[in-house]
Every structure is written in structure tokens, then in C-alpha cells.
Image: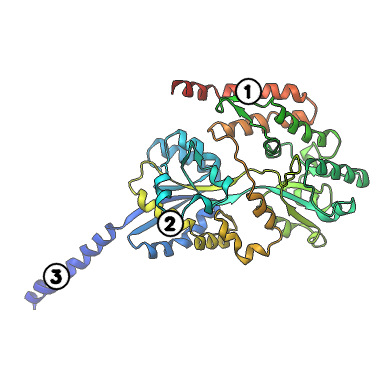
């Protein structure tokens, strides 16, 4: 009996032990870092990918958004970035500057799933620097106008304002009839000022993004236009007056607000029942008759670590996340708007009256300057140091823009040095 065991059963047992181990080791393991709720939900999509790709295993690490940037920078410094990871598309220039992420042109060229025309043009463009693709859009974001249809109709507007002049006119009418604010422009948000400037063809930076261009005629006109709403009592200046956006909008404290898709659900849940059929969304107005005006492209992209040894497997994962089926499944999990245009043809999107404005707006977006210093410029210099002083008349618009140019030129000193060195 012992002889039979050693002759026949023992080799089978050893194969079972070591053969299975070798099979497991033969799989390519890719590490994927994702942020926030996306990181929580993505694990539900992995089984289908691994079924389609039995030789690839995906390990996911979820990272909180508040810690994501620092963790990614630390991982880059220690050469421990994962094979593939999520980036906010405004972070792309920074990681390109660090030489941290893989150019994807050749992958895209050979792909039957990923191609430029399948994505919203403005969103795709945020991932392209000097004609090189560095990221593939995962989900998209932009901002549109939320407005009170009943209040606008009561002052003669049965449609949302489509031009700057209509926006100003309807705001004055609301002020005259109700003695209320109309267009809420938060003094602690940079977005309205940059997006109206871009609509007015302001370049923001000049000379290959080496200097500020905030004293330009186009930028100044946009700031002067928005400042009128503060100066004429059409928008609150003191943020303490709007501690709860939903309550203020529901009570008619203001009637127009620029915000993002996350607020569709919030408005539906938080506004009083009697207001639910009295608000709507619309694309942003234009400075002329070229409606709609531009908004900014937002969202997240998927990139590949330049040092990854598993780039081909990582690309298969990106293709899987970019397929129409997966994009739709992902939307159902987290409500993040799909980056692939065809997914918007689903009945679920076509019948959602609030989503329609976002689809229209996503056809017309324009990215901000694609340099690593841009977030520092908009958050530190524009949002924190420029908007409120102008709104409270602590500084003239001219002086504020001159100072802004000086501050931005200091921030861009290193960029000028690097370009000169090249």
C-alpha cells in the first residue's frame, strides 16, 4: 500500500500543491489606486474583468480624496506608485512634469475600445499635453446653471438666460420686483470668475504659460461684469448670508446658482416639496449669442505608472473601464457621469430632465492652462486673495489685476527657468 502511495498518489499531491502555486504565480497582478466612493465601488466590477482576463488579477486600494495627492506624491518619491491609478484631470500636468506617468499614444492607436472621438472633446483634451495622451477619462464633471423657473417666469423669462446681458437683465428684474438677490456668486469660489473669463476668450496666461495675462481686456471685462452683481446688490457679498445653499434657493433668497451634477440629487432631497417642480438646470450663458457659453471640463482620468512592469495588463484594465457596458455599470454604482458619449444615449439619461443640461454643456468645455502651477494660482491667488477684496471694494479691479499678474509671475519663475534651460 505504501508503495502505491509513493508511486502514484504522492506525485499527484505534490502537483496539486506546487502546480496550483505556479498557476497563481503565473497571473499578472496589477495594483490600482482609486479615490473616494469610486474606490469603494470599483471592486464590484473586478470579477467580470478577471473573468474576461483570467491571467490578470486586480488589487484595489481605496484612498480618501483629502489624502490622495500627498499619498501619490509620496509614492512617486519612493518609487512605489501602483501600476495604474486615478488622477483628477487637473493633476495630469503635475504628474507629467514629474515624468511619473506613461504616454499612451501607442496604446490608443492600437485600441479597438479607446479612441478620442468616443469621449467629450474638452474632457479628452485635459489629458493631452504637447499632443501626447497621458490619461483616459474615467468619469466627467462640469458645472451648469441651476435656476428657479417660477421666479424667472414671474419677471418675464420663460427660459434660462442665454447671454450675459439676459443674465444681468433678469437679475435686475428680480431685484426690482422682490428686493432679493438673484445670481449667487460665492466670494470663496474661483470657478465663476475663470469660466466667465474663458467664455470671453481670455487666455489667462501668455508666452507659453510663462506669465500672467490677467490685465488683458478680455479678463478684465469678465471680472467687471461679475463684480456688477456685487456692487448693485444682485449677489450677496457676505458668505454668512448663505449658510445653507438649499434652504436659500428654496426660499428664493437667490434664484440662479452655478454648480455641478452632485447637486441634482441634493436639490431633489433637500428642497421643499412645493419647490420640486419649480427649478431646472441649463447650460451656462454666453457673452454673445453663441449659446451655450463655455464651462470647464472636470472629472477623473486613469493613468499608468511609467515605471510599471505590467503596462499591457494595466491598459487592458483601462480598456475595460472605458467600455460602454462598464461605464454604464459604474454610473449605476456611483452616479458619476460617464466619460463615453454613447452611454448618454441610454434611456436613463434621455429621460432625466436635469441631466440634459450637463450633456449639452459637456459638448462645450475648455480646459484651463495645463501647467502644474495652475491650482496654486486659482486657489491661493484668485480664490483666497482677489475675489472678496474686489467684491467688498477694498481694492479696485485694476489694482487687483495688476497685483495678480505680479503674484502669478513670481509663481511661474521656475517654469520660465526650466523652459529657458530646455
Name the residue located 53 percent from the left edge and 63 percent from the top edge.
329
Few, some or many C-alpha atoms within 10 Å of disc 3 (few <14, some 14-19, many ≥20)? Answer: few
Q: Is residue 330 left or right of residue 216?
A: left
Q: Is residue 194 above or below residue 58?
A: above
Q: Is residue 126 left or right of residue 79?
A: right
Name the residue located 43 percent from the left edge and 51 percent from the top edge.
32
Q: Identify which residue, 213 or 35, lies in the foreground.
A: 213
Q: Is residue 365 above or below residue 372?
A: below
Quadrant of the image for the N terminus?
bottom left
Q: Is residue 317 visible?
A: yes
Question: Mark number for residue 10?
Answer: 3
User: Residue at label 1?
Assistant: 407
Disc 2 element: loop
Count of marks placed on residues: 3
Residue closest to the far bottom? 1
Few, some or many C-alpha atoms within 10 Å of disc 1 (few <14, some 14-19, many ≥20)? Answer: some
Q: Identify which residue, 312 or 292, lies in the foreground.
A: 292
Closer to the N terminus: mark 3 or mark 2?
Answer: 3
Q: CA distance from mark 1 to mark 2?
A: 46 Å
Closer to the N terminus: mark 1 or mark 3?
Answer: 3
User: Residue at label 2?
Assistant: 112
Q: CA distance from mark 1 to mark 3?
A: 76 Å
Q: Nearer the viewer, mark 1 or mark 2?
A: 2
Rendering coords of residue 178 (x, y %) = 91, 47
Rendering coords of residue 38 (x, y %) = 53, 54
Q: Is residue 244 visible?
A: no
Rendering coords of residue 224 (x, y %) = 78, 31
Disc 1 element: helix
Amino acid at each position: 500500500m505504501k508503495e502505491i502511495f509513493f508511486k502514484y498518489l504522492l506525485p499527484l499531491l505534490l502537483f496539486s500543491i506546487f502546480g496550483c502555486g505556479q498557476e497563481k504565480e503565473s497571473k499578472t497582478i496589477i495594483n490600482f489606486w482609486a479615490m473616494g466612493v469610486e474606490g469603494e465601488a470599483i471592486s464590484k466590477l473586478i470579477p467580470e474583468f478577471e473573468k474576461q482576463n483570467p491571467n490578470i488579477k486586480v488589487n484595489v486600494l481605496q484612498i480618501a480624496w483629502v489624502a490622495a495627492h500627498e499619498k501619490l506624491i509620496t509614492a512617486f518619491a519612493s518609487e512605489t506608485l501602483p501600476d495604474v491609478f486615478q488622477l483628477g484631470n487637473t493633476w495630469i500636468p503635475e504628474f507629467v512634469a514629474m515624468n511619473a506617468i506613461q504616454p499612451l499614444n501607442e496604446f490608443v492607436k492600437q485600441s479597438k475600445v479607446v479612441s478620442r472621438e468616443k469621449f467629450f472633446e474638452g474632457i479628452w483634451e485635459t489629458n493631452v499635453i504637447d499632443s501626447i495622451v497621458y490619461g483616459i477619462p474615467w468619469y466627467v464633471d462640469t458645472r451648469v446653471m441651476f435656476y428657479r423657473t417660477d421666479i424667472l417666469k414671474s419677471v418675464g423669462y420663460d427660459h434660462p438666460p442665454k447671454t450675459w446681458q439676459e443674465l444681468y437683465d433678469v437679475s435686475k428684474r428680480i431685484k426690482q420686483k422682490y428686493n432679493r438677490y438673484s445670481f449667487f456668486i460665492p466670494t470663496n469660489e474661483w470657478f465663476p470668475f475663470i469660466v466667465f473669463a474663458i467664455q470671453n476668450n481670455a487666455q489667462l496666461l501668455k508666452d507659453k504659460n510663462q506669465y500672467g495675462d490677467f490685465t488683458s481686456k478680455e479678463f478684465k471685462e469678465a471680472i467687471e461684469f461679475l463684480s456688477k452683481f456685487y456692487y448693485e446688490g444682485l449677489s450677496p457679498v457676505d458668505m454668512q448670508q448663505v449658510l445653507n445653499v438649499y434652504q436659500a434657493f428654496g426660499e428664493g433668497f437667490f434664484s440662479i446658482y452655478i454648480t455641478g451634477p452632485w447637486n441634482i440629487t441634493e436639490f431633489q432631497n433637500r428642497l421643499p416639496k412645493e419647490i420640486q417642480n419649480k427649478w431646472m438646470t441649463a447650460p451656462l450663458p454666453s457673452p454673445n449669442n453663441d449659446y451655450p457659453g463655455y464651462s470647464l471640463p472636470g472629472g477623473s482620468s486613469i493613468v499608468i505608472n511609467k515605471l510599471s512592469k505590467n503596462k499591457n495588463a494595466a491598459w487592458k484594465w483601462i480598456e475595460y473601464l472605458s467600455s460602454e457596458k462598464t461605464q454604464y455599470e459604474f454610473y449605476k454604482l456611483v452616479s458619476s457621469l460617464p466619460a463615453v458619449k454613447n452611454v448618454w444615449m441610454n434611456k436613463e439619461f434621455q429621460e432625466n430632465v436635469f441631466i440634459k443640461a450637463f450633456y449639452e454643456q459637456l459638448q462645450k468645455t475648455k480646459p484651463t492652462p495645463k501647467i502644474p502651477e495652475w491650482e496654486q494660482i486659482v486657489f491661493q491667488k484668485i480664490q483666497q486673495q482677489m475675489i472678496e477684496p474686489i467684491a467688498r471694494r477694498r481694492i479696485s479691479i485694476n489694482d487687483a489685476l495688476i497685483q495678480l499678474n505680479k503674484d502669478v509671475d513670481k509663481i511661474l519663475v521656475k517654469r520660465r527657468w526650466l523652459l529657458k534651460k530646455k
